[in-house]
Image (cartoon, grey):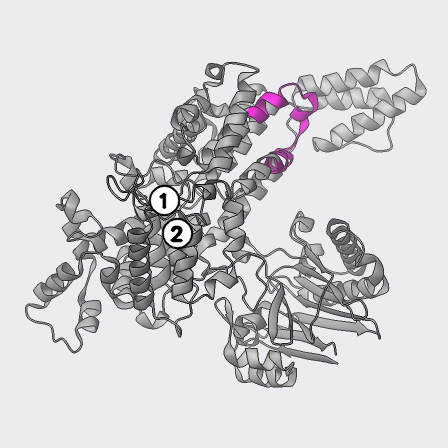
């Protein structure tokens, strides 16, 4: 299938090339009538002729530029063949079917990261992905035991059983690495909930299996696992606008690889095996926030990630980060710096190279003085606790924008009138219809495609979004895009020229509208790398032109 | 003083391909212009494209230096890129191949010694550095080429051109590097120690010697100028 790069590059270009201006017989005859009506007035005729020629150029119709007579163009139009509405609609759906497979599932992004950042000398490239990650955690992260992960004992037991005897303590690590195999993950099949917890008997195996298969969990645990992953793979943290001696290394950058590519609302994950069963244990939707600069635990992880290996080894980073998080949690319950809720941008800019070079004591003090370090739902140091990754997750500015858009929409119509998401939501034709027209349609793949369309349609339903987003902490990038999408469609209803826009123009224009809000909310820009974004843009195009 | 190095990569040597990097410079008592282009290896005439693009950019930047240092970034990018493409199209007239066969990345710096300000132009995965007085700064980062590297003939090329203007500049030297070069200077995101000390002293002869000892897969090129 080619690399992720080549696949995604071709998607946008192919849709842009194939979906220029869409036109019907009615469109062309309207333009021709305008030309005909101006025949009595020479200057008006030539002005309309220029417009008519521009129109023919935009719909890629060839004509003789030296001809000016009306009869020539009338005959030209008479000889043209036009797709009817149904044909156009089915053509669009077919094109989307052809491109959907090119979008990577989370596992593919994870595999790319591991391939790029693994030490070639370890020679683990033929192992299954989850085993490679496990070995990485064992060798470079001391089994994540300093982070409180369970599993070390079970791993040793497994290898001992495999070898039928004791393991010499002198070369224990190498023996484990040489003999551990994918069978260790079979232990997860009959494990209970406690055993699968991070600190449980099989905690480490669960982490690796989740990361490898793109299973995003609730309560901030996926994010925590990703930071630990970033440490053992020696990933880098780039501070934007920092020019001092630091270059952005796209291959190892934590934000780009883990929080823009992997851990996002990638709807392709719903086509993978884990998501086809019971989804109740999965996170409904990653917020899309990426690095949360308001969260003290994330800042601690970044502090250590930004240290070189010479300054601090990977196992040391894990230990020190875990200890600092524990201290801050213990001492921080009185710190209720609520003003932080509204100053994400300030914190992102402040968290610069000057903070990262502070010694540990000063850095910890900086956090205690400036961050909300309280993990208790009710302040006071008692009662229900949050995970440290769940502190300060309110996205107030994005929530404010979302509500404003909903209010604007409600001024024009009831939300029930926007029951559907995608334009393609109520298309009735199924596999039988398309397979008759296109011999290259595979039934299984087509069923997957329709399942994906259902997911995207559900995701883009505004009523569902309004139901889900009750508080600032519920806010997600996808929800904001959905609100913007519906508002944009409403605004375009009265724009007669909009129907002549090409797909590329629609994508570009909607991107500008979206990115203004997305960037302010610290979300990733609208991108053709995300299948949800792509289908939303295509749905706008279909609404406008059909 | 201008320093240059261009070294064949082992990958291209084995395939007996021509060196596809090109650099050039122009200066007077006030302005210094450095330009570097890295031809796309899969494009048949990219070495020629790199040369034509570089020379075109060098000449226009030097000729209209004061204007570009006053224009806004968007206008500057549009003007410069239009000029480069115009020159490329004129060059290939009557020649073999189409425009895409002459593709390359393109980076440049225009430095105003008198006003101590500069403008960087970056299209593609090259890097522009400034060093001196104990600092090494990245004046322009490479593009994110994980989604394809933009080049002179890319669709919507203006979206990918990065122009930066800085009013208060204080460097002893500036340097443009191809991706094959800067990947040897950095370990992931941090500059290597041995390189750091060479750059701090503007020791580009030393840097050339160092790079020549390394086995590099890709072509490795830089052009640098000392400003003091």
Q: Decide which of A139, A162 is in the foreground and name it.
A: A139
Residue B45 in view here:
no
Percent x, y of residue A14: 57, 41
Instruction: List x then y, in percent, for residue A510.
Output: 60, 34
Q: Is residue A497 magenta?
A: yes
Q: Is residue A130 left or right of residue A241?
A: left
Chain where mark 2 sits:
A
User: Which quarter of the rendered picture does the N terminus of chain B lie within?
Assistant: bottom right
A163 horizontally vs A250: left or right: left
Report the residue at 93% width, 16% height from top: A41
Callouts 2 and 1 in the same chain: yes
Q: Are marks 2 and 1 in contact (CB under 8 Å)?
A: yes
Magenta region, residue range: A487-512
- What residue does disc 1 label? A391
The residue lying toward the viewer, choosing from A163 and A252, is A252
Q: Is residue A8 left or right of residue B36?
A: left
Is B113 rendered above or below residue A199?
below
Most distant residue in the left direction: A165
Rate crowding at label 2 as few (under 14), some (14 to 19) or many (20 or more) other CA atoms within 10 Å.
many
> Mark 2 — residue?
A296
**For the point 82% across and 62% down, which residue is it?**
B65
Nearer to us in this view, A380 or A254:
A380
> Where's residue A57, x and y in %?
75, 33
Marks 2 and 1, how far apart at CA: 8 Å
Q: Secondary structure at mark 2?
A: helix
Which corner quadrant of the image does residue A449 belong to? top left
Percent from the top left, x then y, of residue A298? 39, 53
Instruction: Tell me the residue at 61%/34% (across/down).
Output: A513
> Up-down: is B88 above or below A276?
below
- Provide the major secondary structure of the magenta segment: helix
Q: Quadrant of residue B44?
A: bottom right
């Amino acid at each position: 299938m080619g690399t992720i790069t080549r696949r995604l590059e071709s998607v946008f270009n192919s849709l842009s090339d194939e979906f220029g201006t869409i036109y019907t017989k009615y469109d062309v005859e309207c333009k021709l009538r305008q030309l005909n009506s101006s025949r009595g007035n020479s200057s008006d005729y030539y002005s309309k002729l220029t417009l008519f020629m521009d129109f023919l150029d935009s719909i890629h119709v060839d004509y003789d530029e030296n001809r000016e007579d009306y009869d020539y163009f009338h005959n030209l139009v008479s000889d043209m063949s036009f797709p009817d509405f149904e044909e156009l609609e089915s053509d669009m759906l077919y094109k989307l079917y052809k491109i959907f497979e090119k979008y990577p599932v989370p596992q593919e992004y994870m595999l790319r990261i591991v391939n790029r950042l693994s030490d070639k000398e370890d020679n683990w490239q033929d192992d299954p992905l989850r085993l490679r990650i496990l070995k990485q955690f064992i060798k470079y992260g001391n089994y994540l035991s300093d982070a409180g992960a369970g599993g070390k004992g079970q791993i040793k037991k497994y290898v001992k059983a495999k070898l039928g005897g004791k393991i010499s303590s002198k070369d224990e690590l190498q023996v484990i690495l040489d003999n551990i195999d994918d069978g260790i993950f079979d232990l997860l099949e009959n494990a209970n909930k406690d055993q699968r917890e991070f600190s449980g008997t099989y905690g480490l195996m669960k982490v690796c299996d989740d990361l490898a298969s793109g299973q995003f969990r609730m309560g901030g645990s996926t994010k925590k696992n990703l930071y630990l992953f970033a440490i053992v793979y020696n990933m880098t943290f780039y501070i934007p606008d920092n020019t001092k001696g630091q270059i952005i290394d796209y291959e190892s950058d934590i934000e780009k690889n883990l929080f823009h590519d992997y851990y996002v609302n990638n709807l392709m994950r719903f086509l993978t095996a884990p998501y086809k069963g019971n989804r109740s244990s999965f996170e409904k939707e990653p917020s899309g926030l990426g690095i949360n600069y308001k969260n003290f635990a994330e800042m601690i992880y970044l502090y250590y990630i930004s240290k070189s290996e010479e300054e601090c080894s990977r196992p040391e980073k894990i230990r020190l980060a875990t200890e600092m998080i524990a201290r801050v949690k213990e001492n921080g319950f009185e710190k209720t710096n609520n003003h932080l809720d509204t100053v994400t941008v300030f914190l992102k800019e402040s968290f610069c190279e000057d903070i990262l070079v502070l010694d540990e004591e000063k850095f910890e003090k900086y956090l205690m003085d400036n961050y909300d370090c309280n993990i208790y739902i009710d302040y006071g140091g008692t009662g229900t606790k949050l995970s440290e990754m769940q502190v300060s997750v309110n996205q107030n500015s994005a929530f404010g924008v979302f509500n404003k858009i909903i209010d604007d929409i409600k001024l024009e119509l009831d939300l029930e009138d926007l029951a559907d998401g995608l334009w393609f939501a109520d298309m009735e034709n199924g596999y039988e219809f398309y397979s008759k027209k296109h011999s290259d349609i595979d039934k299984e793949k087509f069923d997957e495609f329709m399942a994906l369309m259902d997911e995207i349609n559900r995701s883009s339903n505004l009523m569902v979004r309004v139901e889900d987003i009750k508080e600032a902490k519920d806010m997600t990038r996808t929800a904001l895009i959905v609100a913007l999408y519906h508002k944009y469609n409403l605004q375009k209803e009265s724009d007669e020229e909009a129907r002549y826009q090409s797909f590329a123009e629609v994508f570009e224009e909607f991107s500008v509208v979206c990115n203004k809000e997305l960037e302010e909310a610290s979300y990733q820009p609208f991108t053709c790398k995300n299948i949800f974004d792509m289908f939303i843009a295509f749905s706008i195009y279909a609404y406008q032109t059909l | 003083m201008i320093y240059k190095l261009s070294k064949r990569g082992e990958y291209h040597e084995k395939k007996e391909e021509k060196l596809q990097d090109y650099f050039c410079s122009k200066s007077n008592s006030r302005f210094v212009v450095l330009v570097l282009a890295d031809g796309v290896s899969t494009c048949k005439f990219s070495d020629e494209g790199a040369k034509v693009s570089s020379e075109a950019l060098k000449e226009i930047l030097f000729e209209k230096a004061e204007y570009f240092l006053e224009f806004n970034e968007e206008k500057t990018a549009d003007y410069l890129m239009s000029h480069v493409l115009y020159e490329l199209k004129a060059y290939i007239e009557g020649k073999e191949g189409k425009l895409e066969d002459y593709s390359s990345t393109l980076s440049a710096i225009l430095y105003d010694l008198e006003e101590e300000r500069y403008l960087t132009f970056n299209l593609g995965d090259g890097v522009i550095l400034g060093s001196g007085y104990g600092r090494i700064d990245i004046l322009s980062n490479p593009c994110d080429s994980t989604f394809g590297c933009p080049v002179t003939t890319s669709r919507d090329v203006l979206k990918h051109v990065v122009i930066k203007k800085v009013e208060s500049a204080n460097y002893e030297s500036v340097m443009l590097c191809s991706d094959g070069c800067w990947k040897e200077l950095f370990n992931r995101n941090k500059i290597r120690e041995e390189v750091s000390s060479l750059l701090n002293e503007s020791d580009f002869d030393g840097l050339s010697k160092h790079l020549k000892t390394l086995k590099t897969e890709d072509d490795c090129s830089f052009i640098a100028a000392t400003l003091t």
